[in-house]
Amino acid sequence: MALIHLFRRCNQRCAFCSYPAEGGRDPAPSLKAWLKEIAAMPPGLVQLSGGEPLLAGAENLCMLLAAVKKLGRRAELQTNALAAADLPASELAAIAKTLRAARGYFNVNFPAATAALDLKITRAPGGFRKRTAGVRRLIASGAPVRLTHVITALNYKQLPAFAAFVARELPGAAWVQFSYIKGLGRAAGKKYLPRYAAVRPYLLKALAACEAAKLRCEVDHIPPCFLGDFYRLNVDIVKMREGRDGPHLQEKARVPACRGCRFVKLCPGPRKDYIAVHKTL
């Protein structure tokens, strides 16, 4: 898996952003530089991120996605979907078609089930309405749409409500990933990182709601020992069973509390930034 940040420019100012735009000069978009960076990346999925990639324009994105396809790689286009609400239909269709050709999908950061909480997290007035409309357009475009719900101290008690919202308002989403926050960028420190134990009861209710609605889901950055009967939804288990290299082996590490755990061989441990804040599981 390889991640490329196209630029820092974004139409949100998320409280938990791990790649904030503050400080330094954002380099001008350079298709040539992006293509060179992709060609030099290790094999696997290519994640196109930002900032907000849809601000790069349809022509640039289509050329990038075509290059990923030519290299025989799969593509993940990460977006907050705000721009998708306003893109001309022809441009959105072109991006979706090229993404499908690269065996790819849209990965939408969708942080809340209400406008008030969405604004508190993203600081983007009107963002909830536009994001919802944008996701519906992405789903209608025909390319798979994954919704990533970043779990933070601001929203973890609303996890069941988010699962219900997706099932009710966004039918056609391919799957949902509940992803615990990375303690990087604006999220560094204790403020936004709740304890796994505090998140657990709300997450289990959300996973049960997804199961009842037949909505595919998965969990990242929360060890399987906190997932009860839903432990198989932990994304690292498959990676560990298959012996895959990847960020999970660098970002996470087992701690003394992991000793004797039945998942010790299938789990790389908690995130290091989580342990830096909470010291233990």
Image (cartoon, grey):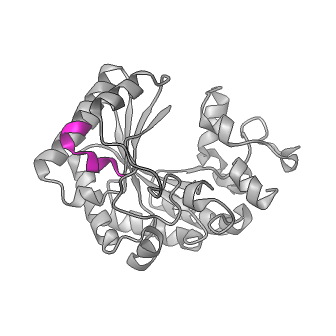
Q: Position of residue 254 (x, y in %)?
A: 79, 42
Q: Position of residue 3 (x, y in %)?
A: 47, 37
Q: Position of residue 203 (x, y in %)?
A: 61, 63
Q: Is residue 27 at least partly visible in the picture? A: yes
* 167 relative to 190 in the view: left or right: left
Q: Main secondary structure of the magenta part?
A: helix
Q: Is residue 263 above or below residue 277?
A: above
| Picture quarter with the C terminus | bottom right
* 163 relative to 271 in the view: left or right: left
Q: Position of residue 243 (x, y in %)?
A: 65, 26
Identity of the residue drawn at 38% across and 76% down: 115
* 227 relative to 256 in the view: left or right: left
Q: Nearer the viewer, residue 70 or 223?
A: 70
Q: Nearer the viewer, residue 276 or 85?
A: 276
Q: Tell me the quarter of the picture where residue 236 sits.
A: top right
Residue ranking furthest to the front: 24
Q: Nearer the viewer, residue 88 or 104?
A: 88
Q: Residues in magenta?
A: 52-61
Magenta stretch holds residue 58: yes
Identity of the residue drawn at 36% across and 67% down: 168
